[in-house]
Amino acid sequence: MTIVADGERNPEPDNVLAYPDQALFLGLREAGQEAVMQALWIYEHPVDLEGLRRFQSGFGRGLMARSVEPSPLPFGRHRWVAAPPPAELDIAESGRQRSEFFEWADEQVELPLDPQWGPGWRMSAVRFADGSTAVSLVVSHCIADGVGAFMAAVDAVNGTSRDIKYPQPRSRSRRQAVVGDLRQIARDLPDLGRTIRKAVKVAVQRRGELSHPSASRPALPAAAGTAQLPSTSIFIDVGAWDALAESLGGNSFSLVAAFAGRIAEQLGRTSGSDGAVTLMIPVSEREGLHDTGGNVVSIASVRFDPEGITTDLTGVRTAIRTGLKTAREVPDEVVELLPLLPFVPKRAFGRIVDVAFGFSSDLPVSVSNFGDLPPELNRADGTAAEYFSFRGVDRNVTRESLDRRGGILTVTAGRIAGIISLSVISHQPGAHNSQRGLRELVAQTLAEFGLTGEIV
């Protein structure tokens, strides 16, 4: 797919969704769930509202100016089509207290989003009683991954114009769509044939996972209703963080992994066989600005013994190297089966997607570490925000679904403006899941590492 600046000719793009993107869309649709990302800025100084509007306008171009149009064929490939411009920026004058920041942020996550019908993303702001301003940007994960969203945000801050000529929705007649999608299937046949042969092999080797991919823990009473997903953000001075990492024989990446691993250990998210912690770490495969895929990542599985990780990072660092090397050299066989997902009965979607995206008896922790972030990300209105954080959130997820998967623990991290920002989301089956409890656990974990930071 080609991206060009305004004024240049842009040829018709290849707008067929990649298999992982279609798998994510279909899996979430079948489960009735949504996966979103949220970026949050806090401004202690007066915010430039016109700057925010310019950011919103710029963000609504390129990767964000699209939605998913399903194929008319039940087994066809879905396509990207143009999305309408975003709605006017929502700016709320409020007497709410700053302590209600995450309550407000959660409310923004719950506002309607839809990668097919739109909007695929939403931006809003609120003024708190103390004069500070919070800004929220929520994006459907079906539209782009974190790196793709960050690239679009940097372009918006810099005023970079990237125009991708996606076709308009329903621009093909039904007959044209059916014929075109049948031709696409014909082009895909060689790959599908190889995938089917691999599927037979994987089905035999991993039949236990595919039949029962959820965590092997004692059964709990069925839990009804939507799950509570407590969330918190932590802001730590980069200098203190790096000094600790070096003193423990590691680096910033391994300290993030150890921090996540220690929280997982305290929550009982360890392997029943050997007590190891398993981290699922997305690794971006995006090939620069011209890559317009949705979720362009591979997943590295990193396992290590959590004992002693608050005083020695060498084991964690070695485990990360091994996990990243394996992810590069040995692709996950179940992920390679995603091209078959359109042909799979809907009742089987959940099992395949659970295995493909890492829900297993090891109770894995999702850890997204973006490292050093572009400074532009901290300037949504053109000026530097005092705080910037981001998180991935599952919407409309039921307690029954989370319990079946063994709960969830997600940690995201990034470094910007001299601060390392970490966000933690957790839900554990049978536990009292609360914001206060999660913050206390995070504070205790920081203390074990000898760190201090601001927890919000």
Image (cartoon, grey):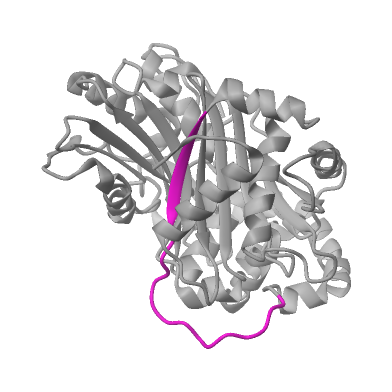
Image quadrant where one finds the C terminus: top left
Query: Does residue 405 lie above or below 250 as drawn?
Result: below
Does residue 205 appear anywhere in the picture?
yes
Q: Which residues are magenta?
A: 216-236
Does residue 357 appear anywhere in the picture?
no
Q: List x then y, in percent, for residue 365.
A: 65, 55
Q: List x then y, in percent, for residue 12.
A: 49, 30
Look at the magenta stretch and give its main secondary structure.
loop
Image quadrant where one finds the N terminus: top right
Residue ID at (81%, 57%):
333
Q: List x then y, in percent, for residue 339.
A: 69, 57
Query: Does residue 38 lie above or below 335 as drawn?
Result: above
- Between residue 381 and residue 82, name the one nearer to us: 381
Query: Does residue 113 lie above or below 422 as drawn?
Result: below
Q: List x then y, in percent, for residue 13.
A: 52, 32
Magenta span contains residue 231? yes
- Between residue 378 and residue 256, name the one nearer to us: 256
- What is the residue that sits farthest to the top in this orientation? 7
- What is the residue that sits farthest to the bottom in this orientation? 221
